Image (cartoon, helix red, strand yellow):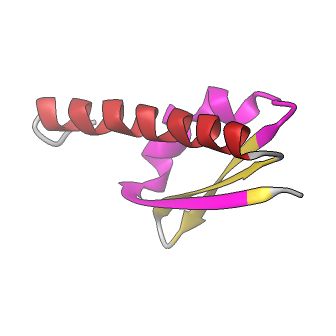
Amino acid sequence: MPITATITTAHPHEEIQQLFATELERKHERSSIALDNASGKAAFTITANDTTALRAAINTVTSVLVVYEKTVEATNGKP
């Protein structure tokens, strides 16, 4: 039975879509990551076949978002 999680960020959808372009194109056997536009903000929908795959996909998304946030912070708000 598939498990689904949603992560919605306050970051602009266009910037996040560029950042995740490669990851969104990859095909994984046990999980998938989709990116939607929720009123101009990025919303990830993660679907997995099991909890281990779900955790790995969530870690992928959050790890890249942490790097993005630190980069924006280091460049004074300019991604």
Q: Nearer the viewer, residue 56 or 79?
A: 56
Q: How many marks?
A: 0
- Furthest-bottom residue in this view: 39
Instruction: Locate residue 9, reporting x and y percent.
Output: 41, 58
Question: At 74% from the left edge and 31% from the top edge, which residue is drawn?
Answer: 25
Instruction: Locate residue 19, reporting x and y percent.
Output: 49, 33
Q: Residue 36, located in which quarter of the rendered image? A: bottom right
In what quadrant of the picture does the N terminus appear?
bottom right
Residue 18 higher or lower than 49, as above or below: above
Instruction: Locate residue 57, reporting x and y percent.
Output: 63, 38
Residue 9 higher or lower than 22, as above or below: below
Check if residue 73 falls in the magenta segment: no
Instruction: Locate residue 64, reporting x and y percent.
Output: 44, 32
Question: At 54% from the left edge and 69% from the top edge, which residue is drawn?
Answer: 38
Question: At 48% from the left edge and 54% from the top edge, which residue is drawn?
Answer: 13
Q: Nearer the viewer, residue 75 or 5?
A: 5
Residue 34 higher or lower than 67, as above or below: below
Give the magenta-colored segment's residue range: 4-31
Question: At 64% from the left edge and 26% from the top edge, which residue is drawn?
Answer: 22
Q: Residue 70, located in which quarter of the rendered image? A: top left
Check if residue 9 falls in the magenta segment: yes
- Furthest-front residue in this view: 51
In this picture, residue 52 sits left or right of residue 27: left
In what quadrant of the picture does the C terminus appear?
top left
Q: Residue 75, located in which quarter of the rendered image? A: top left
In this picture, residue 16 sits left or right of residue 1: left
